[in-house]
Image (spheres, rainbow, N blue to C red):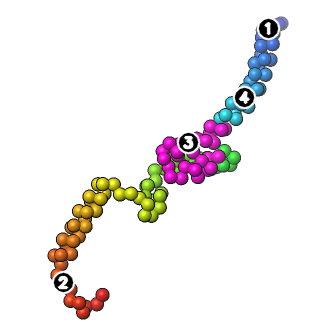
């Protein structure tokens, strides 16, 4: 009885050697890409906390718990005004128009109210 793959012996040895050298490189590239992925997504979506998400993604590769959290965080849509902090949001022209209309309506309502006597409590 003869082994049928005996003729492939040298080829299989070289194939195994190639796999043993290629697989660590592929595994390293995979880990690198997975670590960068949450930060890249956050930067592409112009997330205000993209740097923190990137750090969380890299720490998630080590801990395996933070990586899914970083992915969810990278996909969250935060309101721009809340993310930038109070007083830093810029009003759009349509918001300014609505604010002017509301101010005019408020002034009209205040003008139509009867004047209160000066001596009454404040």
User: Which mark sits nearer the N-terminus, 4 or 1?
Assistant: 1
On-image quarter of the N terminus: top right
At 65% from the left and 38% from the top, the residue drawn is 32
At 47% from the left and 58% from the top, the residue drawn is 84
| Separation (CA) of disc 4 from disc 3 | 25 Å
User: Which mark sits nearer the N-terminus, 4 or 3?
Assistant: 4
Which mark is in front, 3 or 1? 3
User: Which mark sits nearer the N-terminus, 2 or 3?
Assistant: 3
Q: Secondary structure at mark 3?
A: helix
Residue 35 in the magenta stretch? The answer is yes
Q: Is residue 72 above or below residue 2?
A: below
Q: Is residue 11 above or below residue 105?
A: above
Q: Quarter of the image holding residue 96? A: bottom left
| Separation (CA) of disc 2 from disc 3 | 60 Å
Q: Is residue 108 above or below residue 24?
A: below
Are the residues tagged 4 and 1 within 8 Å (C-beta)?
no
| Separation (CA) of disc 3 from disc 1 | 49 Å
Q: Which residue is mark 2?
A: 115
Q: How many other residues sit within 10 Å of disc 4, few (<14), some (14-19) or many (≥20)?
A: few
| Separation (CA) of disc 1 from disc 2 | 107 Å
- x, y percent for residue 87: 43, 64
User: Which mark sits nearer the N-terminus, 2 or 4?
Assistant: 4
At 62% from the left and 50% from the top, the residue drawn is 56
| Separation (CA) of disc 2 from disc 4 | 84 Å
Q: Which residue is mark 3?
A: 40
On-image quarter of the C terminus: bottom left
- x, y percent for residue 89: 41, 58
Magenta stretch?
Answer: 31-58
Q: Which residue is mark 1?
A: 7
Q: Which residue is mark 4?
A: 23
């Amino acid at each position: 009885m003869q082994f049928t793959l005996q003729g492939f012996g040298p080829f299989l040895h070289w194939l195994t050697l190639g796999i043993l050298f290629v697989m660590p490189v592929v595994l390293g590239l995979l880990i690198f890409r997975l670590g960068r992925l949450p930060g890249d997504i956050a930067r592409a979506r112009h997330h205000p906390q993209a740097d923190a998400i990137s750090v969380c993604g890299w720490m998630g590769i080590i801990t395996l718990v933070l990586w899914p959290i970083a992915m969810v965080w990278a996909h969250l849509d935060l309101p721009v005004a809340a993310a930038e902090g109070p007083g830093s949001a810029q009003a759009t022209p349509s918001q300014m128009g609505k604010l002017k209309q509301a101010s005019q309506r408020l002034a009209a309502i205040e003008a139509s109210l009867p004047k209160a006597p000066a001596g009454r409590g404040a």
